Image (cartoon, rainbow, N blue to C red):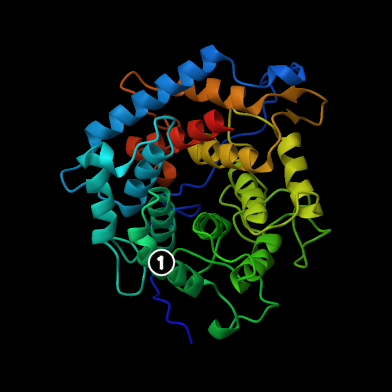
Amino acid sequence: MKTITAGLITLMLAAAPLCGLAEDVAVSGSDSATEPAADETALDTELRSEIERAIDAGLRYLRAAQADDGSWSQSVGVTALVLRAYLQSPRGSTEEDGPFIARSIAYLLDHVQDDGSISETNHNRNYNTAVAITALKATGNAEYTPVIANAQGFLKGLQLDDEDGYARSHKYYGGIGYGGDERPDLSNMYMALEALKASDVDPDDPVWEKALVFVSRSQNNSETNDVKVSVDDGGFAYMPNYSPHGGGESYGGMTSAGLLSLLFAGVDKNDPRVQAAYDWIRANYTVDANPNAKEGQGLFYYYNAFAKAMAAYGEPTVTDTAGNTHDWRRDLAEKLLSLQREDGSWINSLSSRWWEGDPNLVTAWSVIALNHVYGT
């Protein structure tokens, strides 16, 4: 029987702890609605330079905000995200670039626990461990392979299945939550799958097939969901038939996370689940808000997940259901550039829910999003 520590997160960052989950209002559909020619979808030199400057400014802000112990916000999760932002930036920072990188890695390693988790707290252990795996893997340093392997085992051990008393017919089967035996959710699921994918877990490992059971049940798509859905639009909710924004509504952050989860788990791009999620994005395309979320909530979580989802899907443009073609990289880059503060940081000025009042977290997310925009 797997040992899973209980401990329902009291903060109930109900949509993703640091991983901030949530989004903002309804669709605006006003983003660059002109149809570009095929050779116009590449970022032009001027915009690429602006993105580079924005990333550099964000990283300078973060370097100045680092604590003496090597952390950001005294959090393994935030520290791992900042480290990833540095390592995957256009400058390609490495451990040799300065003590600020080495100290952040040391902080993560100092919080490796006997059970394989990497966390400073018993809460959010899945999230913290997942983003720490991704950051340590991004260093390219084989010295961390044993730590990563043990952390992979910890994440797999959190997955709810028959050993935990969850029959396959249970709506939570295959899911992963915050790190105890409480309810799983799609945000924690996506973060775990991203870490397992980044750290090269065997595609035939049972973790993927089990995960797809829960991921598919979190999609509001009656064609492919064996759980009756209250909404049937192809998007994703936070968990089966539940959204922190009301009812079982689909919304932007989770639909991007759901699309990513399907792709991480090896689902073909032409699979009806992938196409239904992509069609929801087409129908709700915007970078002005987190579609279908309460105003301002989880906005930067959405930007981060949207950038990764679009990069993984692999299309340079999105043609919305009204027939307008959008260069998603340009749209997102220009939006993030417009929201960057003078000191180089980003913060959600509309809602601080799910840690989006922490400029360290939000700046790390924004840089990671721009890294995906720049690198695609």
Counting from the top left corner in percent of width and height, residue 350 is at: 45, 31
Report whether residue 318 is seen: yes
In screen coordinates, is 99 left or right of 351?
left
Query: Which quadrant of the figure contains the C terminus?
Result: top right
Position of residue 233 relative to residue 199, above or below, is: above
Q: Toward which corner of the image does residue 286 lie, by quadrant?
A: top right
Label 1 neighbour load within 10 Å: few <14, some 14-19, many 20+: many
Q: Toward which corner of the image does residue 129 lie, by quadrant?
A: bottom left
Position of residue 33 relative to residue 17, above or below, is: above
Q: Which residue lies furthest to the top in this view?
A: 46
Q: Which residue lies furthest to the left in this view?
A: 68
In screen coordinates, is 287 left or right of 105?
right
At x 69% / y 32%, what residue is drawn?
285
Q: Toward which corner of the image does residue 60 lie, by quadrant?
A: top left
Secondary structure type for disc 1? helix
Q: What residue type is labelled 1?
A: Ala
Counting from the top left corner in percent of width and height, residue 344 is at: 34, 24
In screen coordinates, is 200 left or right of 230?
left
Q: Which of 183 and 67 is in front in this view?
A: 67
At x 51% / y 52%, what residue is drawn?
15
Counting from the top left corner in percent of width and height, residue 243 is at: 60, 53
At x 58% / y 31%, what residue is drawn?
289
In screen coordinates, is 210 left or right of 305?
right
Counting from the top left corner in percent of width and height, residue 314 is at: 68, 38
Q: Which of 38 and 335 is in front in this view?
A: 38
Q: Mark 1 points at which residue?
A: 151
